Amino acid sequence: MAREKWGTKLGFMLAAMGSAVGLGNIWRFSFVAGNNGGGAFLILYLLFVILIAVPLLLTEVSIGRKAQSDVVGSYKKLAPGTPWFLTGFFGVFSAFLILGFYSVVAGWSMFYFWNYITGSFAAQPEAGYGEAFGAFTSHSWQPLFWVALFMTLTIIIVVSGVKKGIESANKIFMPVLAIILIVLAFYSVSFEGASEGLRFLFSPDWSAFSDPSIYIAALGQAFFSLSLGMGAMLTYGSYLSKEHKLPGATMGIGLMDSFFAIISGIVIFPAVFAFGIDPASGPPLVFITLPTIFEQMPLGGFVGLVFFFALVLAALSSSVSILEVPTAYFMRVFNWPRQFTSVVMGAIMFCLGIIVSLGFGIWSGVTPIGDLGILDSMDYVASNILLPLGGLTMALFVGWYFTKQQALEATDFTGSSIGQVWYLIIKFLAPVLIVLIFLNALGFI
Ligand code: PHE
Ligand code: NA
């Protein structure tokens, strides 16, 4: 079977941006920033995006494009007879963990979209949006219905080939999401008491830097948000032909993704402070804050509808890139057809989704790691540990297994002076920083 190819470089760009921009920018960015003190977290996050994540994004895409294979197969092909391919299994494993909880949050978003269609969220329910969220997420089967629906849509797109479904939807709805967020940002900063939220996000509390957990949180967010370290971008890169240049494309993806994160911060935090919501509310944060903003706005019911529709599409264009990782791997290894493979993989992820969803209902007391619930525990392992580990091995692979000439050629950096900087980063700086952050989180430094 011939492997798929992107139609054009723009097709790859749209798919990669679609993968990057998603619930991570709005839902995850807001609650992780809220949990980690706001401003100090934002500085570290942006620093890690520039110093580690964007250079690694280029590295990851280039591995896939050079090898033209999935996350395990690429290492086998480029480093035959070595154990490097074992690191690819981290990626396949992370994909299950991540889509396991991503599909649950996407299901919540679909439920919200539905409530704006029916109009029942246009005005605050009697007990408030926080209560409404709690009642829904702890319901015995309702959230599962939406997870199932979301996984079904994800599978349909992956079956029909990533190319067709994703390219066209992203071209329209990413700009729509961006425009709504910009409008919401202006609206949000006009609330009385909004300035406290801006201060929370932009003026760091310097004492927060002494807390080791914010470094790993910022690192994990940088990886999660750029879809980095599990092979999603590698797999997308593998559908790219050699004639397309990579450095500019990866810079663009990094910029776009950070823009979406910062703008959602400007939407969420002023409103959080204006309405007296706790910034450290965790995963429910945006699901309580956003409807509160829409309720205050003229035409808010309609804005909410369009917003959640765009958010669901953004989540879909990310979830397909996650499902694509194990699908590409199992298709090749067992020679299964794409359809069968993606249904099986999607079904396994749905089962994980059930577990995550029950963590907000009958299993709300289950805390696998420390005091973290099921979703937070899976997210912690995947985003803060497995993704950075995956990124670390990619950096070491291209920095130390490739020759310098091979590395520069793989990234279209031959003869470029920025290429020299990139090479120093992935050979030394990024691996050292990741290891230091790990040691720091473990309490060794
Ligand atoms: N980057 C996506 C988001 O921000 C999530 C994602 C993580 C996608 C890992 C692929 C791989 O929503
Ligand atoms: Na993102």
Image (cartoon, helix red, strand yellow):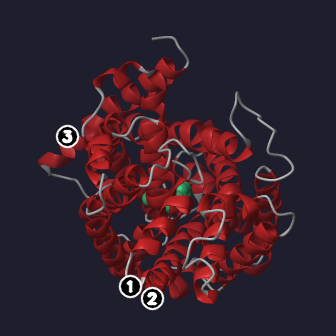
Residue depicted at 46% across the width and 86% down the height: 302
Q: Badges 2 and 1: C-beta atoms under 8 Å apart?
A: yes
Secondary element under disc 2, as helix, strand or loop, is helix
| Residue topped by disc 2 | 168
Residue type for callout 3 = Val
Identify which residue is drawn at 63% across, 81% down. 120
Q: Position of residue 56 (x, y in %)?
A: 38, 47
Q: Along the line of sight, which residue is nearer the eye, 240 or 268?
A: 268
Quick one: label 3 or label 1, which is nearer the N terminus? 1
Secondary structure at badge 1 equals helix
- Image coords of residue 163 (percent x, y): 51, 83
Q: Look at the numbered discs 3 and 1 and tell me whether their residues touch, using CB distance below 8 Å.
A: no
- Residue 100 to residue 363: above or below: below
* Residue 106 position (above or below residue 265): below
The quadrant of the rendering that contains the C terminus is: top left
Crowd tier of the residue under label 2, counting other residues whose Cα lies within 10 Å: few below 14, some 14–19, many 20 or above: few
Q: Which disc is residue 171 wearing?
A: 1
